[in-house]
């Protein structure tokens, strides 16, 4: 499994051991449920790992495209080069991001964003919050919009005092 994960993760920056760990966690959950094909069969374990890898790639692609679609400049939506917007987000410290997340309103938007950041899928968030999946998507979009605005008002790198 590790060799397969190393091949998958080559040149991606992902840790192959993490991929194997996540795949094995999913197989164990399958075992606990006692459903589906024999979860110890090698083809099943390999398929779980491949599916997890694809999920991670999709999530990364979605997060990056969401972050770079547009940014507000003087109240106007304007496209920004992908690398510029991504670099802005990379420079925001975890502490500042958490502070900004605490300011998200309403509470449902904040809760949805926090769960999404923890790796929950739209369906899981919808079930936990008791809202439709489409509303989860709208709430996450609103959360990102609010975060961009909050972090922009704090300055270029998410500093409250505007210093870079």
Image (cartoon, helix red, strand yellow):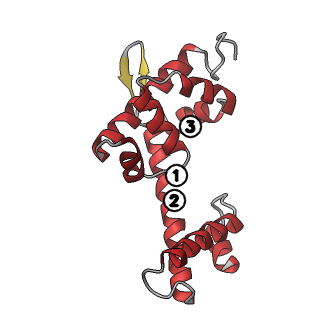
Which disc is residue 60 wearing? 1
**Residue 96 location (% of width, % of height):** 65, 25
What's the CA distance linking mark 1 and mark 2? 5 Å
Q: Residue at x 49, y 70 (%)?
A: 51
CB atoms of marks 3 and 1 within 8 Å: no
Q: Quadrant of residue 89?
A: top right
* In this rendering, position of residue 74 left or right of residue 41: left
CB atoms of marks 2 and 3 within 8 Å: no
Q: Residue at x 54, y 14 (%)?
A: 153
**Residue 138 location (% of width, % of height):** 33, 36
Question: Closest to the observer: 93 or 108?
Answer: 108
Which disc is residue 113 wearing? none
Which disc is residue 86 wearing? 3
* Mark 3 residue crowding within 10 angstroms, few (<14) / some (14–19) / many (20+): some
Circle 1 sits in a helix, a strand or a loop, which is it? helix
Q: The N terminus lies in which quarter of the figure? A: bottom right
Circle 3 sits in a helix, a strand or a loop, which is it? helix
Q: How many numbered badges does the structure rendering display? A: 3
CB atoms of marks 1 and 2 within 8 Å: yes
* In this rendering, position of residue 45 left or right of residue 143: right
**Residue 13 location (% of width, % of height):** 67, 57
Which residue in the protein does label 2 denote?
57
What's the CA distance linking mark 3 and mark 1? 12 Å
* Mark 1 residue crowding within 10 angstroms, few (<14) / some (14–19) / many (20+): few
Which sits earlier in the primary sequence, circle 2 or circle 3?
A: 2
Q: Residue at x 52, y 87 (%)?
A: 43
Question: Closest to the observer: 137 or 155?
Answer: 137
What's the CA distance linking mark 2 and mark 3? 16 Å
Which of discs 2 and 3 lies nearer the camera? The answer is 2
């Amino acid at each position: 499994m590790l060799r397969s994960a190393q091949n998958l993760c080559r040149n991606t920056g992902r840790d192959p051991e993490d991929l194997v760990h996540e795949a094995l966690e999913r197989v164990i959950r399958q075992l606990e449920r006692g459903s589906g094909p024999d979860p110890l069969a090698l083809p099943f374990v390999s398929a779980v790992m491949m599916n997890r890898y694809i999920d991670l790639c999709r999530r990364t692609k979605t997060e990056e495209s969401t972050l770079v679609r547009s940014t507000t400049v003087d109240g106007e939506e304007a496209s920004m080069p992908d690398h510029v917007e991504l670099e802005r987000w990379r420079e925001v410290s975890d502490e500042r991001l958490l502070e900004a997340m605490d300011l998200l309103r309403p509470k449902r938007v904040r809760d949805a964003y926090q769960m999404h950041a923890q790796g929950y899928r739209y369906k899981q968030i919808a079930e936990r919050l008791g809202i439709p999946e489409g509303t989860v998507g709208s709430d996450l979009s609103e959360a990102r919009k609010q975060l961009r605005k909050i972090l922009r008002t704090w300055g270029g790198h998410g500093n409250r005092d505007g210093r870079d």
